[in-house]
Amino acid sequence: MIYLDNAATTFQKPPAVQRTLCEAMRRYGANAGRGGHKLSIAASEMVYKAGEAVAELFGIQDPANIAFTLNTTMALNMAIKGVLLKGGHVIITSMEHNSVARPVVRVAKNRYTVVRANRQGIVNPADVEAAIQDDTRLIVCNHASNVCGSIQDISEIGRIASGHGILFLVDVAQSGGVLPINVEKQHIDLLAFAGHKSLMGPQGTGGLYVREGLELDTILEGGTGSQSESLSQPINMPDRLMSGTVNMPAIAALGEGIRFVRKLGVGAIAAHEMKLAGRLMEGFGNIEGVTVYGPESVKNRVGVVSINIDGLDSITVSQILDQDFGICVRSGLHCAPLAHETIGTLENGTVRFSVGYYNTQSDVDRALTAVSKIKKGKYV
Amino acid sequence: MDYAIAMYSSITVANRVKKLAANQISYLGIIQAPASLGVKGCNYSIRCKFEDLETLRAICDKFGLKIKAVFKETIQNGEKVYIRL
């Protein structure tokens, strides 16, 4: 099989990640922060070390300001509702995933503005600034699109948000581990990340960074292993946002995944993925009847390349790729209807090829050959 | 040997102190201090040699890490005794 669905979750994972996951379950699989015995302390240290790895990657000063979650969706819900439960206007972009759009629609009612990206999926930061209202409390921006790979200028949008005293939440599900991110330099108050994508951790991992001193309303309360005498949720991070037993083995393995990424270098991983994405774009561009979506230059995108083949349903194409060519891709709507509307694919969706660190040029070439054959009807 | 017990609000803070102090203090361990010491909560604490307490305090001050309570752990008449400082 050729796996080109890394935007959904990366596969394979580094050997050290696999080892750490197994070792955590075998050697110190106790409940982190829920006891004073050696194994519980060891488990809590592994969670802390994973927090340190996240902090080092994203330029976060104190690992305590990172709450681990099950995924990016949970982190985004915690951030959006944590800011907006008391009301206020919110700005989102038309490239947002439903993990942003749905909680925003629910909690903000009609007090939200969608800033439209252009047909290539790029948002003009000036449009974000123009959408600011007197009671705007939050700007939410997807760093890189899971639909067409387009990258937003979060540094500029962060500067605008900071200048207006508005909180800035960035969804880095597709960019964490492949694009440089620094919460201080980019004026990011809240950062939601996926652990299981380019950070190379197992599924069931993600997290939310909350700027020092920012106190979010909670959407989940419970045991935190701290201030247990109180019936109120602690104020201190990460306990405020981390109730219940954490997924310690997976978080420990995520820490190892991030160390793997840092050892290789975000720039080197990005260069590898850009090279493969560029080859895909060029190859698809040479097949008549294939439409490539998103930015024209590979420099403005992560390793996500969405296409359609004239006259063919996107889901049918992915089924043929799977069954006849052994190639795994995602098709249809990628949980981001606003983005599909923006790039003009709301009806048919797209066939999404997403490369990762473990893909090779040969994988890409086989995908190109397969699409060419499908277009010519020569796949049976 | 006398020890110092510095209590923190959470295991995360205790882990951070342990990490920050690791190169400056010869012995460090995270423990859950006894409930009988009268400090409410889960009592995650750093236990270090008593002679290192001031270094520990200085590190906590430098990084803004609040110590909930400090105790001296000593042996009197063969019994472990905690003295609140």
Image: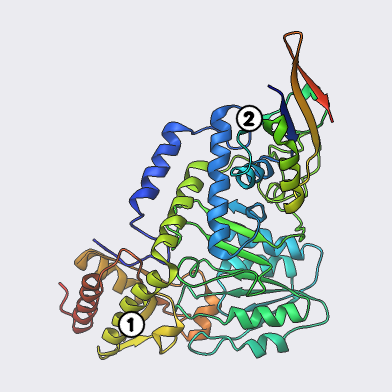
Residue at the spot of label 2: A35
Q: Please state the horizontal and vertical placement of residue A255, each as a whole percent of the image.
A: 48, 51
Quadrant (top left, top right, bottom left, bottom right) of the N terminus of chain A? bottom left
Comparing A8 with B51, the one in front is B51
CA–CA distance in space, label 1 to label 2: 51 Å
Extreme front residue here?
Answer: B51
Q: Quadrant of the C terminus of chain A?
A: bottom left
Q: Residue at x 48, y 33 (%)?
A: A28
Q: Nearer the viewer, mark 1 or mark 2?
A: 2
A299 versus A198 height, above or below: below
| Residue A126 vertical position relative to residue A359 in the rendered view, above or below | below
Total marks placed: 2
Residue A370: x and y in percent read: 21, 75
Residue A352 visible in the picture: no
- Name the spot of residue A328 as percent of width and height, x first: 30, 65
Mark 1 in CB contact with mark 2 (< 8 angstroms)? no
Which residue is denoted by mark 1 in the rendering?
A: A278
Chain letter, disc 1 residue? A
Tell me whether marks 1 and 2 sit on the same chain: yes
